[in-house]
Amino acid sequence: MTTKEPQAPDPDPRQWAVNFLEPKEIKRLIGILSAAGGLELELEHAGTKLRIRMPDPQGRTELVQAPIPYPVNFGAAPPQAPLPAPSSAEAAPADAGSKVPEGAVPFPSPMVGTFYRGASPDAEHFVKVGDQVSPDTTLCIIEAMKVMNEIKAEFNAEILQVLVENGEPVEFGQPLFLMRQL
């Protein structure tokens, strides 16, 4: 017949949770994990969680810097260089040609996404060439990660040209409109 030896009572679980979160104990756990060649350790006790992740020794970190395709001059004087002409007759008035109107300021895209001129494919466009807009006027929608972001004018202006086709992808800083500040 076997008899059970009396066991010491369990320590207070709250005290154990505090102890395993002490820096000294965390360093000890990291040492054990490292010596064993483990990559991840997760502990949970009484609602307290601790997760330690070690870097993968075979993993490779590569830093890539992507160039910005369009100049961005937020807060600076507007550029005076000519911008590309729109690709459709709807986007630019016929008499504008490839010449940039005097006093034209490009309105850059604040994000990467898909450009939409109206709230839906059959809806009227938010703005058209010749419209005067205020800071609260919605110019377009840019869809990013399934979120429709209304893009506001930010200042009083007149729309001179629309530089992007409806449904086209746009990059951060890409000129969307040519506007003349009022």
Image (tube, rainbow, N blue to C red):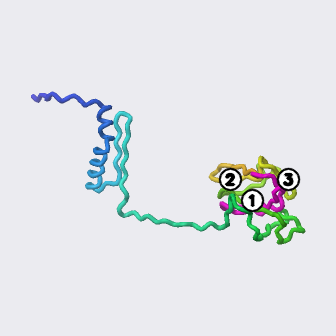
Q: Quadrant of the C terminus?
A: bottom right
Residue 86, picture quadrant: bottom right
Horizontal side, residue 23 vs residue 2: left or right: right
Residue 170, picture quadrant: bottom right
Q: Let me know if residue 14 is in the magenta part.
A: no
Sequence-wise, the earlier of marks 2 and 1 is 1
Sequence-wise, the earlier of marks 2 and 3 is 3
Residue indicated by mark 1: 107
Instruction: Give x and y (percent) for residue 140.
Output: 75, 53
Sequence-wise, the earlier of marks 3 and 1 is 1
Name the residue type under label 1: Phe
Name the residue type under label 2: Glu
Residue indicated by mark 2: 143
Crowdedness near tag 1: few (<14), some (14–19) or many (≥20) residues, C-alpha within 10 Å = many
Give the mark toward the camera: 2 or 3.
3
Name the residue type under label 3: Gln
Instruction: Give x and y (percent) for residue 56.
Output: 37, 59
